Image: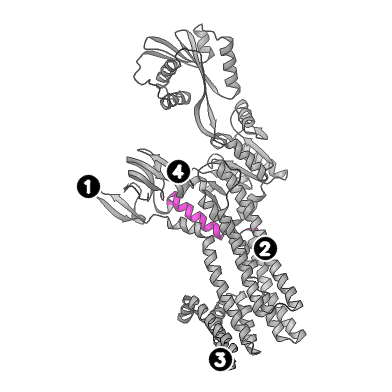
């Protein structure tokens, strides 16, 4: 065991020593020294063959006939017929190819390696006396308060209890834009404090943090094989022994021992075996780097075949928070009307009221110091109040009618216009005159329409929206975004039924939801996609997680899946084409054992370099 470990540890020096001895052998040939020529190539063959034979034996112990066994037998055969130069060159090329393969494969895993290296290792835990003790992150408990200074890494998931600052959340969301954090805000482990100082109370530690789950998911995804990988694995189990049998038959029938061992070398399935896994690792790594978590090669395969995307509305196509979407003004001083309305609504917990006060605050409307003399809530109609000697009515048509206030034709048209867009409406009357009509609605996410169009260009044939919201609002949102089919007033079980119907009619369906309320539909679809927002629930329940909940990530994920599958197919074609080329070369006599090994190793590097193109992939058309 110790000898084997020493050999594997010194594999690179062995490779370079073998190369040097081959050079000496050719020098001996040039000088006319047969002794120097023979000794140098024999030593080069033996030195380089040792690690190959060790690997072949290790594989045989677990009943696997690997490429190393084919090469080992070929080298022994070359020795038998005293083709020392062939055996030396074949073994050197095999080791040199492995060296280059390791180096280039490391590049394809760079994104994932970078991710794992970003995991925090220590935390500054605040003690009862206010001092800070640097602690191993595994020893931090939920409820502990940790201190993070500028440039520091957040070691736990938690809530800010003191201080403020700007966080770079790229490790979790894939988006490097700085995010402001202050008291009460949640933060994720693995994010970097770009500026400020934060004290954070831990809510999740160790393996329970969102970042730890992301790392675990990505690492597991590398080992989850695609359909192509599974097929090739099964194929290689029979292919490699078949090459061995074929070589024996060739040697027996032709009586040409050299031809038989050449068949062994040329039949090595190296590029075929490595082509599919390296494409998937590169594709999944690209996704992780760009905020798209894909749970393995099988998910990549299936997602690339999706032709129908089904969306939840609230929280997926829309932001999920009501906002003021429109204000129709009929007053000389629109700020006064909005200030009085905001002051009155600040007394309410109703979502419409919160949307209006938030809007007034964002637009720097000064309403906090206004004095309310009296106010009365009229059930089913709204609120009436006296503010700064103004009679203020905020509510619906019934409230206006009860106070003998009529809408003009223009106001009535504006009211219907807002309602037809799916907005909830609030009529504001001040001193018996309608001053404003405010529309409040769930706002569509930024750039959704453009990204849905990009998805169609990439191959999506049908866009469907399933929502529990009312039909007017649903139709309005669908028409705004170019959705092909919409169904409203649905319960979660109704959505599942629609997803099943789409699958039954031959569609490959992906459901995009928030990962919590839509879990049944996500589980039923061929591919479940969660607009993650960094929640561990979303990570666990879906096949793909969009960490920043953006449609740009969705376009990237779909395009990346298609590119990865195409890249895998290209690698398979390259591998099979190489074998065909070598066999034809063998038949026509322009390929020999050493040159065959050179082409074989070159084909492995070609499929790796081809897969590495996925690392730089960026979706075209994503906004």
Where is residue 83 shown, x and y percent of the image? 64, 87
Q: Based on the displayed image, in which of its 4 quarters is residue 473 positioned?
A: top right
- The CA distance from mark 2 to mark 1 is 64 Å
**Residue wearing tag 3:** 36
The residue tagged 1 is: 129
Span of residues in magenta: 208-227
Quick check: 94 above or below 222?
below
Closest to the camera, between mark 4 and mark 1, is 4
Residue 420 vertical position relative to residue 488 in the rendered view, above or below: above
SS category of the residue bearing label 3:
helix
Question: Mark 1 or mark 3, which is nearer to you?
Answer: 3
**Real-space Cα distance between discs 4 and 2?**
39 Å
Q: Determine the residue positioned at 34% across, 40% down.
A: 164
Q: Is residue 332 above or below residue 497?
A: above
Principal secondary structure, stretch drawn in magenta: helix
How far apart are the alpha carbons under marks 2 and 3?
43 Å
Q: Which residue is mark 2?
A: 572
Characterize the local packing of mark 4: few (<14), some (14-19) or many (20 or more) Cα atoms within 10 angstroms.
few
Q: Quadrant of residue 66?
A: bottom right
Mark number for residue 177? 4
Question: Nearer the observer, disc 3 or disc 4?
Answer: 3
Pick whichever of labels 3 and 4 is earlier in the sequence: 3
């Amino acid at each position: 065991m110790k000898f084997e470990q020493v050999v594997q540890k010194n594999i690179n020096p062995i490779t370079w020593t073998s190369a040097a001895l081959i050079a000496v052998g050719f020098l001996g040939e040039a000088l006319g020294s047969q002794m120097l020529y023979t000794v140098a190539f024999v030593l080069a063959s033996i030195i380089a063959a040792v690690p190959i034979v060790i690997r072949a034996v290790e594989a045989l112990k677990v009943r696997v006939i690997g490429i190393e066994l084919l090469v080992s037998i070929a080298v022994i055969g070359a020795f038998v017929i005293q083709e020392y130069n062939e055996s030396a060159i074949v073994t050197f090329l095999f080791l040199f190819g492995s060296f280059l393969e390791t180096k280039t494969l490391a590049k394809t895993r760079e994104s994932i390696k970078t991710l794992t290296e970003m995991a925090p290792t220590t935390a500054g835990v605040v003690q009862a006396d206010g001092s800070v003790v640097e602690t191993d992150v595994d020893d931090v408990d939920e409820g502990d308060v940790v201190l993070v200074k500028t440039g520091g890494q957040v070691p736990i998931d938690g809530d800010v209890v003191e201080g403020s600052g700007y966080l770079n959340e790229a490790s979790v969301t894939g988006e490097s834009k700085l995010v402001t954090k202050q008291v009460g805000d949640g933060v994720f482990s693995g994010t970097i404090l770009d500026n400020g100082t934060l004290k954070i109370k831990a809510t999740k530690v160790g393996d329970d943090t969102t970042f730890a789950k992301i790392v675990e998911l990505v690492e597991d995804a590398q080992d989850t094989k695609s359909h192509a990988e599974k097929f090739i694995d099964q194929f290689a189990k029979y292919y490699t022994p078949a090459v061995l049998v074929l070589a024996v038959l060739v040697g027996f029938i032709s009586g040409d021992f050299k031809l038989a061992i050449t068949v062994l070398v040329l039949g090595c399935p190296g590029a075929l075996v490595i082509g599919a896994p390296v494409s998937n690792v590169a594709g999944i790594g690209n996704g992780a780097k760009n905020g798209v978590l894909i749970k393995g090669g099988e998910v990549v395969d299936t997602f690339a075949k999706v032709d129908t995307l089904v969306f939840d509305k609230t929280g997926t196509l829309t932001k999920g928070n009501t906002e003021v979407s429109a204000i129709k003004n009929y007053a000389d001083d629109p700020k006064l009307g909005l200030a009085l309305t905001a002051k009155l609504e600040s007394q309410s917990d109703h979502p419409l009221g919160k949307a209006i006060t938030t809007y007034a605050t964002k637009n720097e409307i000064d309403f906090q110091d206004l004095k309310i003399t009296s106010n009365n809530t009229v059930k089913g109609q709204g609120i009436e109040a006296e503010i700064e000697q103004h009679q203020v009515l905020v509510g619906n048509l019934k409230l206006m009618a009860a106070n003998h206030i009529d809408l003009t034709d223009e106001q009535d048209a504006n009211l219907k216009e807002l309602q037809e867009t799916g907005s909830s409406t609030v009529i504001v009357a001040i001193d018996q005159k309608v001053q404003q009509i405010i529309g409040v609605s769930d706002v569509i996410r930024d750039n959704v329409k453009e990204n849905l169009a990009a998805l169609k260009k990439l191959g999506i044939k049908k866009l469907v929206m399933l929502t529990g919201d009312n039909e007017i609002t649903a139709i309005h949102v669908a028409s705004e975004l170019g959705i092909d089919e919409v169904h409203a007033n649905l319960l979660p079980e109704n959505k599942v039924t629609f997803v099943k119907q789409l699958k039954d009619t031959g569609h490959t369906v992906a459901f995009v939801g928030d990962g919590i309320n839509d879990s049944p539909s996500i589980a039923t679809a061929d591919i479940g996609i969660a607009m993650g927002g960094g929640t561990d629930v979303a990570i666990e329940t879906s096949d793909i997680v969009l960490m920043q909940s953006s449609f740009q990530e969705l376009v990237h994920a779909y395009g990346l899946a298609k590119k990865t599958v195409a890249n895998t197919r290209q690698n398979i074609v390259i591998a099979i084409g190489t074998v065909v080329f070598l066999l034809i070369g063998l038949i026509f006599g322009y390929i020999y054992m050493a040159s065959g090994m050179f082409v074989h190793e070159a084909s492995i590097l070609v499929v790796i370099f081809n897969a590495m193109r996925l690392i730089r992939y960026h979706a075209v058309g994503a906004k």
